[in-house]
Structures are given as C-alpha cells and as structure tokens.
C-alpha cells in the first residue's frame, strides 16, 4: 500500500502562480543583497575572518555589558561579546581580532579576569578557537570554490542525464575554464572570480540550449542566495559549518528537482504531442507533489529537532538547513520547473503551426 497525501488526479495550476513566486523570491534575494551591501558582506566567523573566539558558560544569568567590562583588562583587540544560543543557556562568545597570541595566555587571562571581576558567576571556559588572517582568507576562497564547483558539476550532470548532451556539457566546462583564465589575467579577486564564473555558467547554459541545466542551476543559486541573505538579515555568523549546510542544501534541492524533471521527461515521451508543454509541467509537479511533501516534511522534522534540542553549537547549522530545505522545496516547484517554460521554451525556435485547430506543443519539449 502506497502512502499518498495528494490524491491521484489532483491538478493544481502551479504555473499560474509562477510570476508571484518569482516576485517573492526576488524580494527575499534583493533584501539579502541590500543587507550584505550595507554591512559590507557576511558577518564572518573566526574560521573566515581570523582572530580568536572563546565560549564561556555561566551558572547565573549574566549580561553582555558586564562580561565585556570584566574582560577589558585582558587587553585583547576589538573585543566583541555576544550571547550564544538560547537566553537561558547563559553562554556567551568573546571574540577578538588578535592573531599572534598564545592560546594558553589568553585562556589564563580570561579566567583570571572573570574570577576577579565576576567571582560569583560560576563561569567555565567551554572552548577557545584561534585562526590566523591568512588561514581565514584561504578558507574563504576554498569555501567559495566548493560551492561553485558543486553548481558546475550539477549543471554538467543534468545536461548529460536529461538532454543526453555530454558534448555540450563539455563545451560549457571548457568555455568556463577559458572565462576563469581571462578573469584571473584581469586580476579579479576571489569573490569576483566566483561571481563571474557563475554568470558565465548561466550564460553558457542559455547559449548552448541546456534547458534543464539552466533551471537546476538557477534553482540552486536561488536556495544559496536566500539562505545567505536571511543569515545577513538576522546578523548571524557565517563560518565553515554554514558552508557545510549550503553544500547539503545544494544536494537536497538537486534531488528534489531531479524527481520533478524525471517525471516531466517521462510524460513528454508518453503524452500526446498536442498537449501544451505548460500542462505537462503542471501534471508532473502534481504527480510528484505527494513525494515532495513527505520528503520535505520528514527532513524538516529531523532538522527542527536539531534546531531546538541540538544545543547552541549546532544551532546556526540547523537554522541554515531549515531555511535551505524550505527554499529548496519552493524552488523545485516554483523556480526550476517554470524556468523550463519561461526560459527553456525560448531557447529553440517554435515549430511552425500545423493546419489543425488543436494547440501544438512548444519546442521546449524536444
């Protein structure tokens, strides 16, 4: 017996609302970009910005001001104290921009200052991390490269699997390599190099008429931008655990998109060619809707447990996963599939209309 939340034969016209979905996605992404521009980029954690981070737990309720005043005598540079996790956890992060300092010296200085100025607080140092500025810059570059190459490999895989155009996928990879080489010659920074490479990838997908790859890449970039943008709006740290979450989101979103694309391809083979392409997409999304809801629902329950019960260390990772799963499910239905109609159908010239009165399928069915 098959578990189905959506009855067979359900026909919700998802494509009817695609322009509204585009506006919602664009508004969220634009708000995130504005936030990033105003703040000068993401608020990088110690992994990427360099410096030191000390996590301290207190037995009593404390406030940020008293802790910052207590550790001021240690002499650390650009000290920032912030609450870590839930309010009742009484845990705080003490961050500073110092790079060339001994860890044990820092730990001893912090413990001495807390014991002197907050003697009855019941403090305990949970962890101390220190990263040099060069290591942080290298980690930022590697993180961007990991996300970019993931998206590129996704584009190549989708092109080969759904369109059987491995040669075009190879040309896309070669064209991208040439574009990156020219950007490097122009002296582009790592950030602009990745941005330029993403734009080149999208342009090559369009020029080479890789319709399915174009939809998958746009949907994946949508999920990444939404997650990063919301993190910027919430003023949350961006570190290696968030990069791991983004890579996981890419795989999750791709899996959901492939299910829908596979059903579209299957229906194109079995459906009469007089059926409009828009109707084929709608039917495919409806037929996979039960599976989409079940998969997203069970995954969200698991990640929600990590978010609420996993503790402060994993809190931001779980939040990124929650945002990414919701964005990935949304993009599979309202971004990846509609793009096949709105952009994919424009990649080929439409067939000449037949003398019959019935509507002909768009050339995007090819």
Image (spheres, helix red, strand yellow):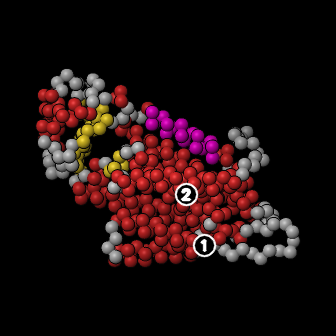
Name the foreground residue: 127 vs 52: 52
Residue 238 visible, this orientation: yes
Classed neighbour count for the residue bearing mark 2: other residues with Cα under 10 Å, few (<14), some (14–19), many (≥20): many
| Lateral position of residue 48 relative to residue 170, left or right | left
| Lateral position of residue 314 relative to residue 99, left or right | right
Of all residues, the one furthest to the right in this rendering is 356
Which region is colored magenta?
A: 292-308
**In the image, what residue occupies the spot 50% across and 58% down?**
221
Name the foreground residue: 171 vs 54: 54
**In the image, what residue occupies the spot 60% across and 72% down?**
209
- Magenta span dominant secondary structure: helix
Quadrant of residue 158 within the rendered picture: bottom right
* Vertical placement of residue 89 versus 165, above or below: above
Say which label, 2 or 1, has the lower sequence index.
1
* Vertical placement of residue 278 versus 197, above or below: above
Q: Position of residue 303 (x, y in %)?
A: 49, 39
Q: Position of residue 107 (x, y in %)?
A: 17, 38
Residue 162 visible, this orientation: no
**In the image, what residue occupies the spot 36% across and 49% down?**
238
**In the image, what residue occupies the spot 66% across and 63% down?**
341
The residue indicated by pointer 1 is 209
Q: Position of residue 211 (x, y in %)?
A: 61, 67
The residue indicated by pointer 2 is 219
Residue 298 is inside the magenta segment:
yes
Q: Position of residue 310 (x, y in %)?
A: 42, 34
Quadrant of residue 352 within the rendered picture: bottom right
| Image quarter of the C terminus | bottom right
Q: Secondary structure at mark 1?
A: loop
Classed neighbour count for the residue bearing mark 1: other residues with Cα under 10 Å, few (<14), some (14–19), many (≥20): many
| Lateral position of residue 101 relative to residue 187, left or right | left
Residue 295 is inside the magenta segment:
yes
| Image quarter of the N terminus | top right
């Amino acid at each position: 017996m098959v578990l189905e939340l959506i009855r067979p034969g359900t026909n919700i016209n998802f494509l009817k609302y695609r322009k509204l979905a585009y506006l919602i996605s664009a508004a969220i992404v634009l708000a995130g970009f504005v936030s990033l521009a105003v703040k000068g980029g993401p608020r990088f954690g110690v992994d990427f910005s360099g410096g030191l981070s000390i996590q301290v737990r207190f037995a009593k309720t404390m406030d940020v001001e008293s802790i910052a005043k207590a550790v001021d005598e240690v002499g650390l540079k650009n000290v920032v104290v912030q609450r870590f996790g839930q309010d009742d956890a009484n845990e705080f992060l003490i961050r500073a921009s110092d790079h060339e300092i001994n860890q044990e010296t820092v730990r001893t200085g912090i413990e001495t200052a807390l014991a002197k100025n907050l003697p009855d607080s019941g403090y305990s140092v949970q962890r101390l991390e220190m990263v040099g500025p060069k290591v942080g810059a290298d980690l930022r570059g590697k993180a961007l490269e990991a996300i970019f190459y993931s998206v590129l490999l996704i584009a190549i895989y989708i092109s080969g699997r759904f369109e059987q155009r491995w040669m075009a996928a190879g040309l896309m990879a070669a064209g991208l390599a040439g574009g990156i080489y020219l950007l490097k010659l122009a002296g582009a920074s790592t950030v602009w190099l990745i941005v330029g490479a993403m734009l080149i990838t999208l342009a090559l997908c369009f020029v080479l008429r890789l319709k399915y790859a174009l939809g998958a890449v746009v949907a994946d970039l949508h999920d990444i931008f939404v997650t990063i943008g919301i993190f910027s709006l919430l003023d949350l740290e961006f570190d290696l655990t968030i990069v791991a979450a983004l890579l996981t989101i890419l795989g999750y979103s791709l899996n959901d998109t492939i299910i829908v694309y596979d059903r579209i391809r299957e229906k194109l083979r079995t459906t009469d060619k007089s059926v409009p392409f828009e109707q084929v997409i709608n039917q495919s999304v409806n037929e996979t809707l039960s599976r989409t809801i079940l998969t997203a629902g069970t995954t969200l329950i698991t990640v929600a447990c990590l978010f609420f019960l996993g503790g402060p260390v994993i809190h931001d990772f779980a939040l990124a996963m929650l945002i990414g799963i919701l964005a990935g499910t949304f993009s599979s239905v309202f971004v990846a599939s509609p793009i096949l109609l709105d952009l994919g159908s424009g990649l080929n010239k439409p067939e000449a209309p037949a003398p019959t009165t019935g509507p002909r399928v768009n050339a995007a069915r090819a």
